[in-house]
Structures are given as C-alpha cells and as structure tokens.
Amino acid sequence: MLAESSINTFTDVVFAKTEQGRTEVARRSAGLGARQRSVLIMLDGHKPAGELTALMPAPQLARILEELEALGLIAPATAPEVPNDAARLAPVKAMLIRSAETYLGLIAADLVRQIDAARDEHGLQRAIGRWHMAMQESKYGREVVEAQLTQVKAALQARA
C-alpha cells in the first residue's frame, strides 16, 4: 500500500504512455484489469494524474499508477520548458476571470477555479472552451463573448 505522502504527490505528476504502453492499448496483451486499462488509455502526457481522481478514489488511482509504471506502460512525462509561463498567462487569466465574474454571476465560481488552476497554455485552452460555452449560454455574456474571445486570442498570440 502506498504511503499517504506518495498518494498526495502523484496528483501533480503528468504521466505518458511508453512505447510498450501504446502497444498494450492496441493489442491488449498484458492482461490488465478494466480500471487499469481505463487509466492507461486516459493518460495522455498532458494533464496531471490528479485530474483522474474524479473517476476513482485517490488511493486506488495511486495504486494503479504504481502498477502501470512497474509494468513499464507509463512514465512521468517530460514537459517542455516554457519560460515564465505563469507570468505570460496571468493577464489572460485575469481577463477571463473578470468577464466570468461580471457576466456569469454565481455560476462563475467553478469556472473561475478552473481558469485560476490552469498551469500552462494547454490547461488554459480547456478553460477557455468552458468559459466560451458558459458565456454564450448566459443572458448578458452572449452579447460580448465574441469580442472578448478575440481579445483573449490576441493576448495569447502576443505573449507567445
């Protein structure tokens, strides 16, 4: 059984399939259980493993990750260095949060947390998608969403 500190540290780790893991997804030759196979398929080398805790309890997920790693099917992903990514994305995140709070009211809380939690441009792009849909569905947001999306895109390109 994993130690409690081990369970808490895997949540920020990004795992990717190894060549052997990609072969396993295609051929089903390692005899994985359904949950192990599901976790293997969902690991994409981009999102932290902690995002999968919505699907199963953290201790169970940690055990499966440990097993998949021991089998050589996954490994921690090496993310490309993005210099000053947090500082580069901060103004864009502030713009999104400000408009969500202004036009979405109480339903903005979960979206604001997702925007704020985005650590890189990939995570922020997912949050932008949710923000765009929520704004389009809101009474007042739909009037300004396209203009604001244009500003968000321009800000991301200018900072790239």
Image (spheres, helix red, strand yellow):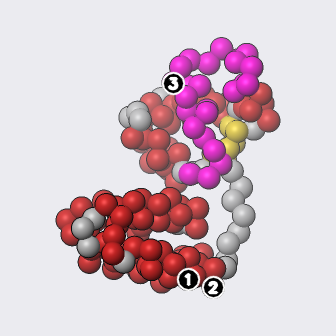
The residue under label 3 is which amino acid type? Arg
The residue under label 2 is which amino acid type? Ala
Numbered tag placed on residue 158 in the rendering: 2
The percent position of residue 74, horizontal first and vertical second, equals: 68, 37
User: Magenta segment: does it hold 110?
Assistant: no
In the rendered image, which residue does mark 3 sit on? Answer: 35
The residue under the point 41% across, 69% down is 116
* Mark pair 1, 2: CA separation: 5 Å
Magenta residues span: 24-47
The residue under the point 65% across, 48% down is 45
The residue under the point 33% across, 70% down is 142
Residue at the outermost right position:
19
Nearer to us in this view, 53 or 72? 53
* Mark pair 1, 3: CA separation: 41 Å
The residue under label 1 is which amino acid type? Ala
Nearer to us in this view, 24 or 96? 96
Quarter holding residue 72: top right
The percent position of residue 29, horizontal first and vertical second, equals: 73, 16
Q: Are marks 1 and 2 in contact (CB under 8 Å)?
A: yes
Numbered tag placed on residue 155 in the rendering: 1
Sooner in the amino-acid sequence: mark 1 or mark 3: 3
The percent position of residue 43, horizontal first and vertical second, equals: 60, 41
